[in-house]
Image (tube, helix red, strand yellow):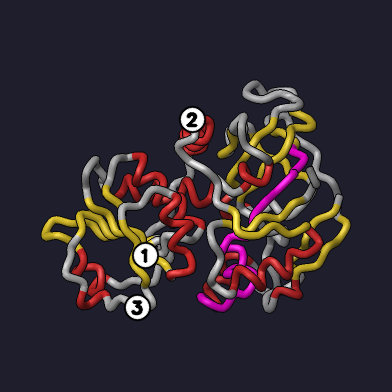
Amino acid sequence: MKAIICTGYGAPDVLQLQEVDKPKPKDNQILIKIHATTVASGDCVVRGAKKYGPIMKIMFGFKRPRQPILGTELSGVIEAVGKNVRKFKVGDAVFALTGMKFGGYAEYICLTENSVVSLMPQNATFEDAAALAFGGTTALHFLRKSGIKPNQKILIYGASGAVGTAATQLAVYFGANVTGVCSAQNFDLVRSLGVNKVIDYTKEDFNTLNKTYDIVFDAVGKLNKTQAKKLTDQNGKFVSVSKGMVKELTDDLNLLKELVENEQFKATIDKTYPLANTAQAHEYVEMGHKKGNVVLTIIEG
């Protein structure tokens, strides 16, 4: 099968399209023919190994990632199942989150039936479904951590990114009064997700904002506690994607599926690239201005 291999740490050109062995499902596994995956910021961090340097290499491998096929979320169709699999059948269209096990930048992947995998929303394309899992489950984790309730005021910093667009829609679903922070060029996108107000971070000085919130959610990991404290009410909560690991749950995929099917949530896709152009997709993501998700299409149509 074809796969994008991370041949070492460094610039995006370390990502090379290669032929590798097609996996075979074990008794408790499903074999998924992948139709689409995404380039998440975490993929870029692991490939570049810059942000955490030696610690990253201890975690993932010294010369290159031990799992050289990156990609943390995907959608596709089940092609084969192991003899002990009961939850899925051949032909099921599914979407999944692989987390730090990666494996999405390939034509096939094997996952256990108890992995974070669910049937796709019936009204979603494969590209849409691939872009739901990471942002959606991350947003759900931190919104739950914040204790979000109806009618609370929430500020979402980075409302136009993969996590931010998901958090914005979910906060609206939970009945909150949402203020989104992004650049002016992304105002229309963020407004379309249901926010009550948008703030241009390039023009507003957060230190002088004459308003406080029940929850401040930093969806890009760039705010510090001092900044957040000035924006939260006395009993307000500050949550950030840079603080704590996300617990990945199949139930969250099931909730996202339900919300998409009820037209209460939608995938936000900025650009789509073919698998062979994964390096270019990484270059674009690293510019730091993507709107929602960047998708890699493995099977056209």
Report which residue position mark 2 lands on.
262
Q: Are marks 3 and 2 in contact (CB under 8 Å)?
A: no
Residue type beneath disc 2: Asn
Location of the C terminus (image quadrant): top right
Mark before the other along the chain sequence, 3 or 2: 3
Rendered residue at 33%/66% (across/down): 199
**In this orientation, does residue 173 appear?**
yes
Label 2 secondary element: loop
Q: Is residue 55 above or below residue 142?
A: below
Q: Is residue 237 above or below residue 171?
A: below
Closest to the camera, between mark 3 and mark 1, is 3
Provide residue 160's location: percent of width, then percent of height: 47, 60
Residue type beneath disc 1: Val
Q: Are marks 1 and 2 in contact (CB under 8 Å)?
A: no
Q: Is residue 67 above or below residue 85?
A: below
* Residue count near mark 3 (Cα–Cα under 10 Å), binned few <14, some 14–19, many ≥20: few
Report which residue position mark 1 lands on.
181
Residue 203, labelled with which disc?
3
Label 1 secondary element: strand
* Residue count near mark 1 (Cα–Cα under 10 Å), binned few <14, some 14–19, many ≥20: many
